[in-house]
Amino acid sequence: MTTKTFQTIPRNVWVLGFVSLLTDISSEMIHSVLPLFLVSALGANLLTVGWIEGIAESTASVLKVFSGALSDYLGQRKKLAVVGYGLSTLVKPLFALATSPAWVLMARFGDRVGKGIRVAPRDAIVADVTDSVNRGAAYGLRQSLDTIGAFTGPLVAFILMSFSGQNFRLVFWLAVLPGILAVALLATGVREPDNRNNRRQNNPLHWSALQSLGKSYWVLVVVALLFNLGNSSDAFLLLQAQQAGVSASLVPLTLVVMNIAYSLSAYPVGLLSDRIGRLGLLVGGFCVYALAYLGFAFVNAPWQVWGLFGLYGLYQGMSQGILLALVADRVPSHLRGTAFGLINLATGVALLPASLLGGVLWQTISPKATFITGSIFALSAIALLLVFEGGRRKSVGKE
């Protein structure tokens, strides 16, 4: 059954998956050691690190809307994806050449601009070349390959740092290579989806176009926004791991466990969603998140930490690709880029207040308060989704 499904997944999806894998190896080789490089080699303080990351991620979130809308307007998704991946690769040498935090800010800004340009068109390509029969499996496969890169990159960086005497710049230079391979693979291996929508459209950000996305789509946006208001930075998970007794040298490996669980679950869950429906699995993923966050609130032993990070990875495997597939199912094909961009904006906007709230609760009340609040937001998002879906099905039944 799985082999047959693999064969039905379009070539574009496979290529995009390996492009994501190579890009994540490149990016995570840099990002896994960048904070240490900023502080120990360039003399930056933690506030500077926070500003650099905040500016970079906020820029990416906003750009996703416009790149997605532009891909709908032009009817050309591949070109924008190539520009986005290409820009991220082009600025990576700046990390190796950096002599001050300002250089790193420029590099991170360019890298995240590239991500902001590429994400929505890339996700729309997957939707354009699939249908409801294999769309969940396709998104799950791409997410799985992406996540393999996400945990391979830090491992490669760890090995290089160990054998090079903590040579940050060597790691940064070598990280350029998989980025170049990713752009070359995208440019030569992905074909622009051949459909009737590959022509100029009206302004996809016009009010009438946004209305035509449909109520069921906008509910997904609100649900994603509400959920992510409680989804604070994973840095809090790492801090809690250390407080529970995991040694500082082993803390980064908790993310490897998380990403392995994510990678192993994303494709099977996507495949299952094509057979039994996506909504129940998304709700299940949110429930797993709530359970994991409650676990982090009360964790008191290192062995529990490893299991909770595995559970957190399972939540990602049960939700990330499923949400994308639901969006693709519910919006008109000529507005998919816009739809992906808008929901990415909503989740990106929520992450900053979520982390601020998490930090305030951590310092003023307790770490438990941070994680319990995250669980409450997740359960609230589940309730909203179930109430709307119940009402929608009743109205359909009356018709």
Image: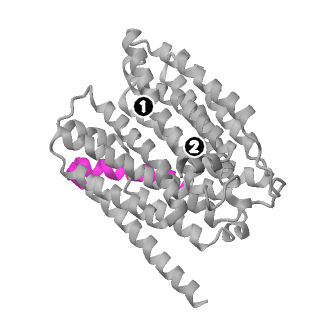
Judged from the image, the secondary structure of the residue bearing numbered disc 2 is helix
The part of the image, by quadrant, that contains residue 201 is: bottom right
Count of residue discs: 2
Look at mark 2 in the image and give the residue it sits on: 60
Residue 11's place in the image compared with 388, above or below, is: above
Question: In the image, is 211 to the left or to the right of 48?
Answer: right
The part of the image, by quadrant, that contains residue 49 is: top left
Q: Nearer the viewer, residue 187 or 340?
A: 187
Residue furthest toward the left? Answer: 300
Residue type of the residue flagged with mark 2: Ala
Q: Is residue 36 visible?
A: yes
Residue drawn 38% across and 23% down?
Answer: 36
Dot 1 surroundings within 10 Å: few (below 14), some, or many (20 or more)? some
Question: In the image, is 339 to the left or to the right of 377?
Answer: right
Q: Position of residue 69 (x, y in %)?
A: 70, 54
User: The C terminus is located in which quarter?
Assistant: bottom right
Q: Nearer the viewer, residue 335 or 185?
A: 185
- Which mark identifies residue 203? none
Residue type of the residue flagged with mark 1: Thr
Judged from the image, the secondary structure of the residue bearing numbered disc 1 is helix
Residue 301's place in the image compared with 364, above or below, is: above
- Magenta residue check for 358: yes
Q: Nearer the viewer, residue 11 or 127?
A: 11
**Principal secondary structure, stretch drawn in magenta:** helix
Q: Position of residue 67 (x, y in %)?
A: 68, 48
Residue drawn 39% across and 10% down?
Answer: 163
Cα gap from disc 1 to disc 2, whole angstroms: 19 Å
- Magenta residue check for 125: no
Q: Position of residue 333 (x, y in %)?
A: 71, 61
